[in-house]
Image (cartoon, helix red, strand yellow):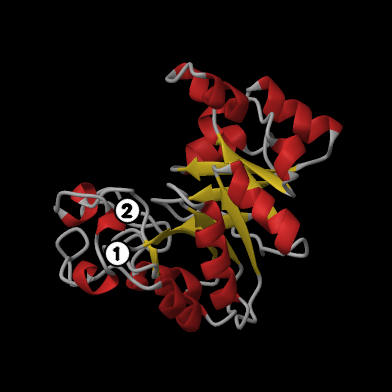
Amino acid sequence: MNLTRCKLKSPRQSTASNTEDCYPENSYAAIKRAADLGYGIEFDVHLTKDDIPVVFHDDTLNRICGVKGNLRDYTFAQLQQFRLLGTTERIPAFADILKMVDGRVPLIIEYKVEKNADKLCSICDRILSTYHGLYCIESFHPLAVRWYKTHRPHVVRGQLSEDFTKKKRSLPYFLLSHLIGNCYASPDFIAYNCKHKNELSRRLCRKLYKSLSVAWTVRSQEELDKVSHSFDLFIFEGFVPRTKQAVS
């Protein structure tokens, strides 16, 4: 199974949803293109200074918008001044993306938690309460995953992780790397960095507990072929896989 991640590193690259045109990552245009092609979509959600959920990947604006500062320090209206990777695309509101997709394809919605997981989850959940399409949520932050276990147990929830110990050696990152928080958050699936497919805790969770295992982010057909036996579901960008399977 494959889902497209609407992400683009530079204007010279193509998104997972198109190999000819340039669509900035997490943009309205990129997500619409992926939905039009029938791919399930993964995208990221932050809160603005005035608590409007928006679709954007980074915590800061520099890489995509060429502007200094954190996204959370700007209101939604202020963010509309900026363009994505030099195009005419702006940072889209979460509600507008949901309205456009309109249940046509499944969604994996990643919550980007910086300070208050409860606030982000509750605001987004109110918006999602009127959405009739298929979706699940995921987050690196166990508190966001736990919020859904407590308040919306019927919504499928996933724990994002990778082997942080390769770069960061503090206790919280050790716990996240080895999925120790799973006993608290009780995720329905684990989404792990495909480059760390051999991490022992991830493999044990998949084998012993039959946890659905999701790979992020696959960036070529060659890489997909290498990890295809280690995961159940694949989030990809920058290419169109040779075989597109339906997302159930």
What is the quadrant of the N terminus in the image?
bottom right
* Amino acid, disc 2: Leu
Picture quadrant of residue 163: top right
Pick the residue in front: 33 or 65. 65
Q: Is residue 245 above or below residue 159?
A: below
Q: Looking at the picture, how far across and down is residue 157, in whole percent?
A: 68, 54
* Amino acid, disc 1: Tyr
Distance Cα–Cα, label 2 vs label 1? 7 Å
Q: Looking at the picture, how far across and down is residue 80, in whole percent?
A: 21, 72
* Residue found 68% across the figure and 49% down from its top: 146
Q: Is mark 1 on a helix, strand or loop?
A: loop
In this rendering, would 209 be left or right of 223?
Answer: right
- Mark 2: few/some/many CA within 10 Å (<14, 14-19, 20+): many
* Residue found 49% across the figure and 37% down from its top: 222
* Residue found 72% across the figure and 37% down from its top: 182
Pick the residue in front: 135 or 207. 135
Picture quadrant of residue 147: bottom right
Q: Are marks 2 and 1 in contact (CB under 8 Å)?
A: yes
* Residue found 64% across the figure and 50% down from its top: 145
Check disc 1 and report the residue beneath it. Answer: 23
Q: Is residue 218 above or below residue 41?
A: above
Is any atom of residue 208 visible in this view?
yes
Name which of mark 2 and mark 1 comes first in the sequence. Answer: 2
Check disc 2 and report the residue beneath it. Answer: 8
